Amino acid sequence: MSAVELLAEIAGVGRDRARGGYSRHLFDRAEGELRTWFTERAGRLGLDVETDRNGNLWAWWGAPGPDALVTGSHLDSVPGGGAFDGPLGVVSALDAVETLQKEGFRPGKPLAVLVFAEEEGGRFGVPCLGSRLLTGSIDADRARALRDPDGGTLAEAAVRAGFDPVRFGRDEEALSRIGTFLELHVEQGRGLIDLGAPVAVGSTVIAHGRWRFSFTGQGNHAGATLMSDRHDPMIPAAEVVAAAHRIASRVEGARATVGRLVPKPGGTNVIASTVDVWLDARASGDDQVRPLVDEIAHVASEAAAAEGCVVKLAEESYGGSVAFDANLRDELTNFLGGAPELPTGAGHDAAILAPYARTGMLYVRNPTGISHAPEEFAEDEDVARGARALADVLRHLST
Ligand code: GLV
Ligand code: MN
Ligand code: MN
């Protein structure tokens, strides 16, 4: 089945009727359906599917072994996300394997399609949990205790989905198998539109992280409480939203976003008791992100004090900037006939793996330039070109 047909096959899974687009989150029903679908599809290609200690799925073409050539991406989404971020890399990998099989090719080294357990942090807040657990770049106890918006822990959700969270943690054996990891991904900006090219090679990922400001005030009645008597945590929360935009706009290449603001209890006629503000901050320089957050945190403290509220700040995740393996990048660029090289502001499992294995990325043109929204797109023709490029690259790298 082609990548386009495979995408069509999962087009009905995890649709979010309230938000639009897709909500496919770690250990929820849609994500479970996609795991079953992947296992079945990979099985039909004769691949042996195994799940590692951290819930990542590996589909092996031939016997698992060291120095393997591994390709894949993720199947989870942001809340209300598009159809391509993640799944495009998975379906392109299956398509590439099938193409190579039909061409009679047999890889000269172990080859696997890898589906990371989760990449977006859409449910438990921390992104790239599959690759962070695999590499040990998140403490397993901390991961197990992460909570979803309903208050349940990752460990509880894992057990309910049939996984054993006690086994979570750095997986030396799985990690040692990855010689090269290549992730194909839909482009999440306008780079390829502007260049008029269908496929690019990834160069760098900027530094990025997530922080949570928790403001506590006094819940109360929206009508009976005089304006002068309030301790409304929504007021300093609003200051943080505006400060993030203002402060990041002054730093070249920086981005700061509040995409998630959670008032409790969340009633129209209720002054909130607490408000959680999730800040996503990114910048090209490793030394730029934390100072940016410090400046926003200063605004948060002053605004909280002025409203008689208390604020706590937690760093939920952080990843420094990453340059993908230079030799691999040059090899891919030359092999693909001088494909353009693109930096990205988006995070990827490939970036988490970069310190541990030879790692690279391919991007496929997105004609809307929009991502993490239902408008994210790739033309069928470009999906096919991306899968073909991946097949050619896998053939080249595995001989
Ligand atoms: C993942 O797509 C991210 O960059 O947040
Ligand atoms: Mn994403
Ligand atoms: Mn992604």
Image (tube, rainbow, N blue to C red):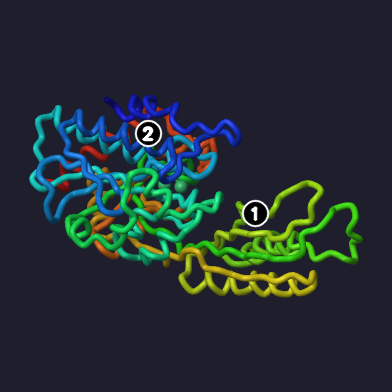
- Res 351 quadrant in image: bottom left
The correct choice, above or below, for 180 with respect to 374 in the image is below
Quarter of the figure that contains the N terminus: top left
The amino acid type of the residue labelled 2 equals Glu
What's the residue type where badge 1 is placed?
Leu
Decide which of 384, 73 is in the foreground and name it: 73
SS type, badge 2: helix
Residue that appears at 56% across and 51% down: 149
Say which of 219 and 214 sits in front: 219
Which residue does the numbered mark 2 point to in the structure image?
A: 33
Q: Is residue 124 visible?
A: yes
Q: Earlier in the sequence, mark 1 or mark 2?
A: 2
Q: Residue at x 54, y 35 (%)?
A: 375
Circles 1 and 2 in contact, beta carbons < 8 Å:
no
Disc 2, ligand 3: is the CB inside 8 Å?
no
Spatial CA distance of label 1 from label 2 is: 29 Å
Identify the residue at horizontal 50%, vertical 39% (top origin).
23
Q: Is residue 28 left or right of residue 270?
A: left
**Which residue carries the number 1 mark?**
261
104 relative to 311, above or below: above
Q: Position of residue 294 (x, y in %)?
A: 60, 74
Q: Is residue 152 left or right of residue 96?
A: right
Callout 1: few (<14), some (14-19), or many (20+) C-alpha neighbours within 10 Å?
Answer: some
Q: Is residue 280 rendered to the left or right of residue 338?
A: right
Specify few, some or many for label 2: CA neighbours under 10 Å numbering under 14, 14-19, or 20 or more: some
Q: Give x and y (percent) for residue 31.
A: 40, 39
Residue 218 placement: quadrant: bottom right
Q: Is residue 352 left or right of residue 266?
A: left
The answer to whether residue 347 is visible is: no
